[in-house]
Image (cartoon, grey):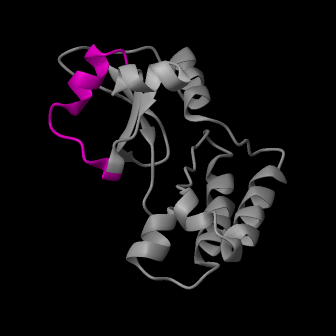
Amino acid sequence: TLDLLEARFGRPRGWLSPGMAQTDDSLRLLRVHGIEFDHDWMIDDRPVWLETPAGPIVGLPYTLALNDVTTYVVEHQPDGSLADRTLRSLAVLRREAEHHPLVMPIGLHPHVMGVAHRIEEVERIVAAVTEHDDVRACRSSEIHDWFTAQVPPP
């Protein structure tokens, strides 16, 4: 899989399994094949080092609470619910981040949010994240690089 992805897009640095369907050996296999970070373990709001027999790998935050599949496909919540959850979470996490940096992952999938009746909701979420000087939207690899520059592997 990694070779196919590399041929098309470049070598991936991180991983999120489809449906977070990892096994007890997944982290070791990912590390053996050069993956630097993983989102599969529902890490809360801060990266952590995870030990594997092949060496450490960074566990990056991922969430089901701020995830469109959970909100709309599983829980069948009304449109606007994800934006409401995200904005309320952002307010709390901004206060908590005054003491230490936090990560607030938002799980968006094109087949759920990329539909006409939810585009304005995505725009509300993006506006809320980008309107604050103390909040930064970034890619997983940027979070990994920021974390590993400050916290050496065990």
88 up-or-down from 95: above or below: below
Q: Quadrant of residue 118?
A: bottom right
Residue farthest toward the bottom in the current orientation of the protein? 78
Answer with left or right where residue 128 lies relative to residue 17.
right
**Residue 76, percent across and down?**
45, 82
Q: Depth check: give the residue in front, 66 or 78.
A: 78
Quarter occupied by the C terminus: top left
**Residue 59, percent across and down?**
39, 34
Residue 12 appears anywhere in the view: no
Task: Tell me which residue sits at (61%, 27%) in the image.
Answer: 142
**Residue 18, percent across and down?**
34, 47
Q: Depth check: give the residue in front, 126 or 147.
A: 126
15 up-or-down from 104: above or below: above
Q: Is residue 30 magenta?
A: yes
**Residue 141, percent across and down?**
56, 27
Q: Quadrant of residue 89?
A: bottom right
Q: Quadrant of residue 119?
A: bottom right
Task: Tell me which residue sits at (17%, 17%) in the image.
Answer: 53
Answer with left or right where residue 62 lies relative to residue 55.
right
Task: Tell me which residue sits at (53%, 19%) in the image.
Answer: 10
Residue 1 appears anywhere in the view: yes
How many numbered discs? 0
Q: Which residues are magenta?
A: 19-35
Answer with left or right where residue 34 lies relative to residue 96.
left
Quarter occupied by the N terminus: top left
Q: Is residue 2 magenta?
A: no
115 up-or-down from 135: above or below: below
Answer with left or right where residue 115 lies relative to residue 33.
right
107 up-or-down from 4: above or below: below
